[in-house]
Amino acid sequence: MAGVLAATGAALLPGAAVASPAAPAALPAGGGGHGGGHGGGHVDPDLLRTWLADTYTSLDAMTDPGTGLVADNIEGSLDPETASAYTSPTNIGGYLWSTVVARDAGLVDDDTARERLATTLGTLERMDRHDASGMYYNWYDPATGDRVDTWPDDGAPVEHFLSSVDNGWLAAALRVVAEAEPSLAEQARGLYDGMHFGIYYNPEGRPDLGVGLIRGGFWDTEPSGCSVPGNYTGGEQVYYTCHHYDTTVSETRIALYLGITDGEIPAEAYWGTYRTFPSTCDWSWQEQRPSGVTRTYDGVPVYEGVYQYDEMALVPGWGGSMFEALMPDMLVPESEWAPRSWGANHPLVVEAQKRHGLDEAGYGYWGFSPASNPAGGYAEYGVDSLGMRSDGYLSDGTTDVDAGFAGCREGTNPDPEFGDGVVTPHAAFLGLEYDPRGVVENLQRIAADFDAYGPGGFYDAVAVRSGTVAERYLSLDQAMIVAALGNYLDDGALREYVVDDEMEQNLRPVLAAEVFSSAAEPVVPAITEPAPKRPVSRIEGLAGTGEPGAHLTVTGRDGATWCTADVDADGAWACDVPPVTRKGAHHVTASTTNDAGRTVTSDRITLVVAGHR
């Protein structure tokens, strides 16, 4: 495309040194750098700008100048002849927000950026869509904007699908353009307003809760595989996927967010997805036994389940990948709006991914998400223990961790030996706002230890034990890197472009209401009544705090049980004890055991009976 990248200032090598903070920062307790400041130590912004410039170069190279449509992928040489002959709504959306970031960072001038955005919008206006819903099909030819009818590789026919999540990312990008480029606002908003996410919403998706879920998408003609005929908006019949998107930690929530924002999906649909599946033996096929507590929001009971990873408790995704957890956070201020849910969970996901790569698997590097397979093709990578799917997204593609399901089944591979782990730089970049120094040091090691940095920035993936590099660029992965860098360098600017009054009014209160069971460390039970070491005349009952949903036992020094209780959703408990009137000190301990079988025991607690005065 026309236009030259502007100079970025100091010339820096990809592995240039990081500015060293005085001391390592502790794991953030409530989110990263949203709303000012960054957790985990500052890094050299010039290095980040160099990475940003190189990454945008790859997107520029794989974009057709006549249509403004970015290809799905390109080889590492950036030769335009190696760009794929297909693209998707997500790819197109990623190019749009990346061009805005590049403009704001001074990498392209205002006129060039506007021309590029306008070209893409003009092509979007003439591309085939589903007329009634305004949704885009999944595959287009970037050279023409026409739908892809046969696969370029093998000539197989394409069944034209309209994906809820892919359209969600394109729609979110249109919101960015509408706010960031006033001269194109009417055009971008017109395209956005024509997209109706209500067509994906099945109001009977969770009949057990009385709320709905969104479908994966639909075909406008009957496909060869499984489908469900219907139309939730009452129009001409379409053919829905047989599955819904029913997990909370999923990149697919962007479509739900937009539907709620626009008033086409009821807010209570947010409570229909699973934080984890239930903690019963009927669900023991899932990766591990969750623990948690049920809370009620808008009349809907929600099991706020979490998985354990080391001493942390966090809400898992389906496969355990970084992009499932953090991709929506690029465009919606989840940590700021939901400090008791997403703000608590996001930094824990980053920390768990980091520990998996450095400690559990011992790869020396981290960042796991679906990406190019260095051996060829594409594969789903993640941290198996962070995903509900029984065989997860495997960090080396082969090693399936199975620690069992406490009380229901034994694990078949609780202490595995990991093989040739595959890290993808975009996954690490997604954690930039939560652990800046850790992310940058990790990426510098990848750049220094492998031939993994090319003319378009970091290549897509590296198998770290064999040293095999997937020397190509995927436009979606590059766009996630651009978004992460843009938000870090410009105080969350992409989120500010996406959010408007309607989103503040309709979506923010929903997110703000929730309390995940996520925790950076175990909750140690405590006795608060009577206060330890404070003399009382007699003891007839105890009260205190502990892990919500856990079962508590207070035990005397002789091993006798004083009382038991269930910790409520607010972390409080109380129990009666046979009256204790003997003067002197009474030593007890309090312990809690959650549904996952994890027991946490307090230090010795001293209760004092002084007798009657």
Image (cartoon, rainbow, N blue to C red):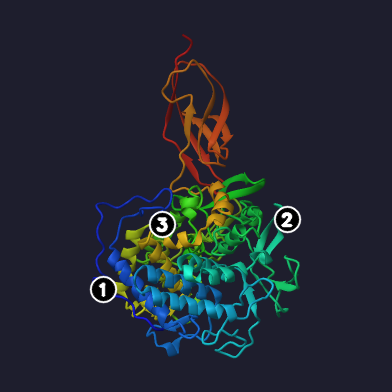
Q: Is residue 159 left or right of residue 28?
A: right
Residue at the image position 48 percent from the left and 24 percent from the top: 530
Q: Is residue 514 left or right of residue 455?
A: right
Q: Reading the chain from its start, which is encountered first: label 2 or label 3?
A: 2
Quadrant of the image occupied by residue 445:
bottom left
- Is 465 located above or below residue 140 in the figure? above
Q: Reading the chain from its start, which is encountered first: label 3 or label 1?
A: 1
Q: Secondary structure at mark 3?
A: helix
Q: Reading the chain from its start, which is encountered first: label 1 or label 2?
A: 1
Tag of residue 351: 3
Q: Nearer the viewer, mark 1 or mark 2?
A: 1
Question: What whole-number distance in Å separates the C-alpha atoms at marks 2 and 3?
Answer: 36 Å
Question: What whole-number distance in Å separates the C-alpha atoms at marks 3 and 1?
Answer: 27 Å
Q: Secondary structure at mark 1?
A: loop
Tag of residue 207: 2
In the rendered image, residue 451, in percent from the top left (x then y), is placed at 32, 78
Q: Is residue 313 visible?
A: no
Tag of residue 341: none
Quadrant of the image occupied by residue 564:
top right
Question: What whole-number distance in Å separates the C-alpha atoms at marks 1 and 2?
Answer: 56 Å
- Is 480 located above or below residue 598 in the figure? below
Residue at the image position 47 percent from the left and 47 percent from the top: 519
Q: Quadrant of the N terminus?
A: bottom left
Q: Callout 3: 10 Å neighbours few (<14), some, many (20+)?
A: many
Q: Secondary structure at mark 2?
A: loop
The type of residue carrying mark 2 is Pro
The residue that disc 1 covers is: 13
The type of residue carrying mark 3 is Glu
In the rendered image, residue 425, in percent from the top left (x then y), is placed at 39, 70
The type of residue carrying mark 1 is Leu
Q: Callout 2: 10 Å neighbours few (<14), some, many (20+)?
A: few
Residue at the image position 35 percent from the left and 53 percent from the top: 37
